């Protein structure tokens, strides 16, 4: 069915050998790119950019034009779902996205609308536009935040220093979180199916804040809901065979449990050694990561060295997608990213010989 | 030599069975206590409080008066060392401690004074005062920040959102960090010896930010320097036999390596399951932790349940010091802490029967 030319990432996700380690970069469409800033300025606000299929698809393919990347990822924000559920998303440049009226109690959760995925049609349209522009050169990744990660923002209002409000609700009102989680599992499942229907070739779930929880609560409020989403995707004919990547930042201690979630690949942050991670998860799952984004602020040589270290540690390159361990930051010089990507492509060849 | 009456924590640290699981609480002398706030107001600034042996010893024993705790920890701040080294520590109530002139380059590191531990004599005096007031009821814990954690503050100026400056220097100027680390190992070793000489019965190293690093850099910039400090302490006649607790927040993935550092106990944050931690580190080391501090915002029942869960998971209570997985926050109701402590004391008895 797929006539995508560069199938490296799809192959890795399906356990098929490739000629060199594929690369994409979390937040690859973003503020470190001058062309992104230009489009962003044209769009008006950040939200206008997210909601314009034409401009969102434009910024999605900007990094593909500039770098030798093996996938695009649709430009959007994980907080579009809470927005569609009725928490009005706001954005200020010096603050990032936030909600004016974060959730405080069960009543406020009960009125949230988890049937309103049509409100996110603009993301589907952006995917359709992007697929046209990509012209089957590389696959397109669709994504969502995890239920727990969306819960944290919906309860806190924005990314806070310690996330104390939501972490306390875990203990003093778990029912509220269970209710919210249930609605989010429903919405996220539909949202990812919608993205696949529009053309997304791979689906990724970002669990940015799973690492805030203790093990029991991680299983209960983050991993199990993600598993439910994966089950929902496996039971839908559109998403049944779509590769799924699951990324919990700070999830190094739970890799064994994550590897049994039904996902095709696990995103690693930069803290865990990739070889140690491979030993924990076994051979039947792919790994994505795991360079510290701050390595991109080093010299050309130190960037290459840091990337080589990960490839060397990993050894035989099978089932590895190179990426950062978190999103690229706005202060990175794009030339440094080019050095990284080209180096990974060249250096990894030796690990893919039969 | 020691005529301390309550030896539970010392016993646990030395692998000796006790009658119930001992408890102390990270940041137990602090803003959640009204009596602390009162003394703090009398002192003037936070730094005045740290630097007054009389008042620092007073706030140190306040929680001992109020709760059934098994140890006191000297009231101080981890940033006293950088202050003594020449980076002037400042403090504003709405900001926390900070340095006006954080470190940018090798030259600024080279002029730091690592011989100036005498400037911290006020901490030794506070320990002497505290020991008098404690009257041998419970042991006193002395402490320092880890070299890496102090480096982060000295480079960033204060706790920042992503610690991008210091994380970048790890890659673009490791020499600067190595030079700084060397000076800090020297200062911290002397500082801890000074504290032991003044009467500290246990020494703890707080590595609040080790979890920011990738595995190689954690070993290089955080764990190995802490090992050097432990070696220095083992080679000094005053600290040779003092129990040492090492706590890396976010260090769950490195417990095996930490367990080989020579410390007597490992502090666990709240993310890792304590039973999983025990399996990783083996039987010959003690564990301290690991309740999520936010559990203290729950109902009486949920607090007890969360504590019981940890004790149940751990099972046989040998070699466990109950504590939070991070410092208690200023918004906790002291009555909730009392419920926790009393519950741990009562509930843990069954795990200590022979």
Image (cartoon, coloured by chain):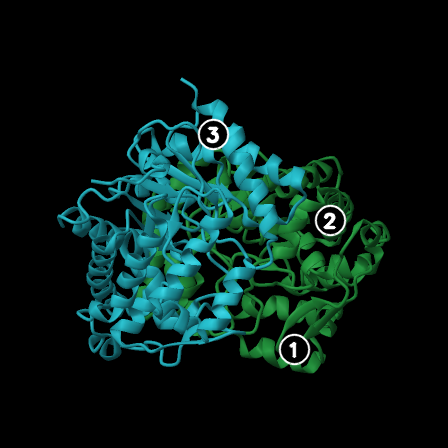
Chain colours: A green, B cyan
Q: Is residue B280 visible?
A: yes
Regarding mark 2 in the picture, which secondary structure is present there?
Answer: helix
- Near-viewer residue (B219 or A191): B219
Which residue corresponds to mark 2? A188
Image quadrant holding the C terminus of chain A, namely: top left
Per the image, the residue denoted by label 1 is A40
Kindly identify which chain the residue marked by label 1 belongs to. A
Looking at the image, residue A172 sits to the left or right of residue A253; the answer is right
The N terminus of chain A, quarter of image? top right
Above or below, comparing residue B55 to residue B239 in the picture: below
| Residue drawn at x 38%, y 47% as measured from the top left | A273
**Same chain for the residues at labels 3 and 2, yes or no?**
no
Task: Reply above or below: B48 against A264.
Answer: below
Residue A309 horizontal side relative to residue B237, left or right:
right
Per the model, the C-alpha gap separating discs 2 and 1 is 26 Å
Pointer 3: what residue?
B314
Tag of residue A285: none
């Amino acid at each position: 069915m797929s006539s995508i030319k560069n199938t490296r990432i799809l192959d890795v996700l399906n356990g098929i050998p490739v000629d060199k380690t594929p690369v994409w970069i979390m937040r690859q469409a973003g503020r470190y790119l001058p062309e992104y800033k230009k489009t962003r300025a044209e769009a008006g606000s950040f939200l206008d950019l997210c909601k314009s299929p034409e401009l969102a698809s434009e910024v999605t393919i900007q990094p593909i034009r500039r770098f030798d990347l093996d996938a695009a990822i649709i430009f959007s924000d994980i907080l579009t779902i809470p927005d569609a559920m009725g928490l009005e998303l706001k954005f200020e440049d010096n603050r990032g996205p936030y909600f004016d009226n974060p959730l405080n109690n069960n009543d406020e959760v009960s009125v949230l609308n988890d049937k309103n995925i049509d409100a996110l049609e603009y993301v589907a349209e952006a995917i359709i536009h992007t697929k046209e522009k990509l012209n089957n050169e590389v696959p397109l990744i669709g994504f969502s935040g995890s239920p727990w990660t969306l819960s944290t923002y919906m309860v806190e209002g924005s990314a806070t220093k310690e996330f104390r409000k939501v972490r306390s609700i875990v203990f003093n009102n778990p029912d509220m979180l269970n209710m919210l989680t249930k609605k989010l599992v429903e919405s996220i499942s539909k949202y990812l199916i919608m993205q696949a229907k529009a053309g997304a070739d791979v689906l990724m779930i970002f669990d940015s804040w799973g690492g805030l929880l203790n093990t029991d609560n991680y299983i209960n409020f983050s991993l199990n809901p993600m598993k439910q989403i994966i089950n929902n995707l496996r039971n839908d004919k559109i998403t049944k065979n779509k590769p799924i990547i699951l990324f919990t930042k700070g999830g190094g201690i739970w890799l064994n449990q994550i590897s049994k979630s039904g996902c095709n690949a696990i995103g690693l942050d930069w803290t865990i050694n990739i070889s140690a991670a491979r030993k924990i998860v076994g051979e039947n799952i792919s790994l994505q990561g795991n360079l510290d984004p701050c390595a991109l602020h080093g010299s050309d040589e130190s960037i290459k060295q840091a990337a080589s270290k990960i490839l060397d540690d990993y050894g035989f390159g099978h089932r590895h997608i190179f990426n950062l361990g978190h999103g690229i930051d706005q202060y990175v010089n794009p030339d440094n990213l080019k050095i990284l990507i080209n180096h990974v492509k060249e250096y990894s060849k030796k690990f893919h010989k039969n």
